[in-house]
């Protein structure tokens, strides 16, 4: 595919991704065919390879047609990213050495933000994780409110069903359970009749 021989003055070559091959070269081999890139000098390029799709923005994005070209043949970008494969448990340990290598190539090249692949993936899924956590918190709060509401209703029902009518001293105490609405009228009649009976005995 792309190598050190792909420099200025040589044959302009590019590598395309699988989505672009499927969309624009369906049923044919794209290797050796030419395409016009309208960025920069609008020159024709020869396709020398096809690579897999890359999700460069987020895990939820859909792959779009992409073209890869050697920077030595297309020096029109003022910023670019470098991907470095490392070994060991601390990938950021090579950052000082990487800065040294860049300075040896060009002292004017600054090294910007350095992030590991794990950091990039975590930043990509952070909104989804926050939404999931927020939904979980609201779910627990709703469950607690529902439990408190059920307890309050049950406590109120039990309290109403155990009301007790207390008469003055020397009179009969009648307990009324589960009485409500019109059913309270007979209880009142019973209490009144009992009071009249006690009064008649005292005469």
Image: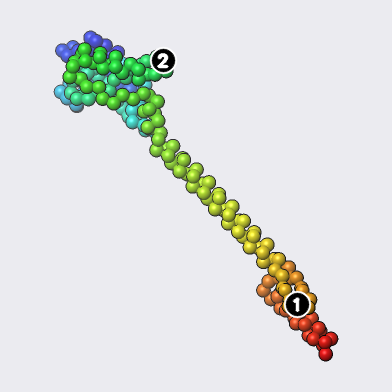
Going from N to C along the chain, the mark reached first, 2 or 1, is 2
Callout 1: 10 Å neighbours few (<14), some, many (20+)? few
- Closest to the camera, between mark 2 and mark 1, is 1
- Colour mapping used in the image: rainbow
Query: Among all residues in the image, which is located at the extreme front?
Result: 169
Q: Position of residue 183 (x, y in %)?
A: 71, 74
Query: For residue 112, which numbered disc appears in the image?
Result: none
CB within 8 Å, label 2 to label 1:
no
Callout 2: 10 Å neighbours few (<14), some, many (20+)? few
SS label for mark 2 = loop
Find residue 128 and report its image quarter.
top left
Quadrant (top left, top right, bottom left, bottom right) of the N terminus? top left
Using the image, determine if residue 83 lies above or below residue 59: above
**Residue under label 1:** 169
Find residue 62 and report its image quarter.
top left
Would residue 186 be seen by someone viewing this image from the given angle? no
- The residue sitting at 21% across, 13% down in the picture is 105
Q: Is residue 178 left or right of residue 122?
A: right
**Residue under label 2:** 88
Query: Among all residues in the image, which is located at the extreme right?
Result: 201
Q: Position of residue 83 (x, y in %)?
A: 32, 19
Q: Position of residue 7 (x, y in %)?
A: 19, 12
Query: Among all residues in the image, which is located at the extreme bottom?
Result: 203
């Amino acid at each position: 595919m792309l190598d050190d021989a792909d420099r200025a003055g040589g044959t302009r070559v590019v590598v395309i991704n699988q989505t672009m091959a499927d969309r624009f070269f369906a049923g044919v081999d794209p290797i050796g065919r030419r395409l016009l890139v309208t960025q920069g000098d609008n020159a024709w390029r020869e396709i020398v390879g096809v690579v897999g799709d890359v999700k460069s923005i987020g895990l939820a994005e859909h792959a779009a047609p992409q073209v890869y070209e050697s920077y030595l043949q297309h020096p029109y970008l003022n910023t670019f990213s470098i991907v470095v494969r490392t070994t060991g448990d601390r990938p950021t340990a090579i950052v000082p050495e990487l800065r040294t290598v860049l300075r040896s190539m060009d002292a004017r090249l600054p090294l910007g933000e350095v992030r590991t692949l794990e950091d990039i993936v975590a930043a990509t899924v952070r909104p989804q994780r926050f939404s999931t956590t927020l939904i979980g918190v609201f779910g627990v709060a709703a469950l607690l409110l529902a439990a408190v509401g059920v307890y309050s209703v049950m406590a109120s029902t039990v309290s109403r069903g155990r009301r007790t009518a207390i008469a003055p001293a020397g009179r009969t105490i009648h307990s009324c359970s589960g009485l409500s609405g019109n059913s309270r009228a007979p209880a009142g009649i019973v209490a009144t009749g009992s009071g009249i009976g006690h009064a008649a005995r005292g005469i």
